Image (cartoon, rainbow, N blue to C red):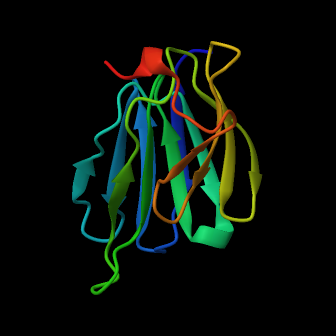
Amino acid sequence: MGLVPFAVRPTPDPRVAVVVAGGSAYLVDVVDRSWRRLDVFPASQVVEVPDAGALVFASPDTLVGIARRAGDGVLDQVWTTDRVATDDLRVVRVVGTRLECRGSEMFESFEVDATDGSVEWAGGARPSHLSW
């Protein structure tokens, strides 16, 4: 799969862009040029979820969602999943606010709600090998 080598993406806030470089992801205020590193490394995929007003970042084993915070409307990292894959985590499809995801193991199949980061496993329960 590999890293997203370099990407600049718009966000739900026209004043803020996402920059991905060297596996790190940043929120950059394009007006005052301030930036903040997101808690995802290495960033291997960036997916837009318009119905949730969110961008979702995949690392090899977790997902991170950015959207406007409730209350003040500031664009920020609003959720992070627990470890959901052994490796090679990919978002394979977006349907509404739901992300269909797969990991490297055949039983690592699940959906994530991009509004809150909640996970629903295809088999009904979280695979036991991901509990550590």
As displayed, is residue 24 above or below residue 77?
Answer: above
- Residue placed most toward the observer, 50 or 105: 105
User: What residue is shown at x 40% (from left), y 24% (from top)?
Assistant: 42
Task: Quadrant for residue 111, please give it.
Answer: top right
Instruction: Assign the C terminus to one quadrant of the image.
Output: top left
* Residue 95 percent across, percent down from the top left: 77, 57
Q: Nearer the viewer, residue 115 or 8?
A: 115
Residue 99 location, x and y as percent? 66, 49
Most foreground residue, 129 or 112: 129
In this image, 55 relative to 106: left or right? left
**Image-based side of 94 in relation to 61, left or right:** right
Tag count? 0
Task: Give the residue drawn at x 58%, y 17%.
Answer: 88
Q: Please, is residue 80 above or below residue 29 in the view?
A: above
Query: Residue 40: x and y, percent?
Result: 35, 36
Residue drawn 51% across and 31% down? 126
| Residue at 56 percent of width and 71 percent of height | 53
Determine the image quadrant of residue 110.
top right
Q: Is residue 80 left or right of residue 61?
A: left
User: Could you say where residue 107 lies in the image, as x and y percent from the top left?
Assistant: 67, 20
Quadrant for the N terminus, please: top right
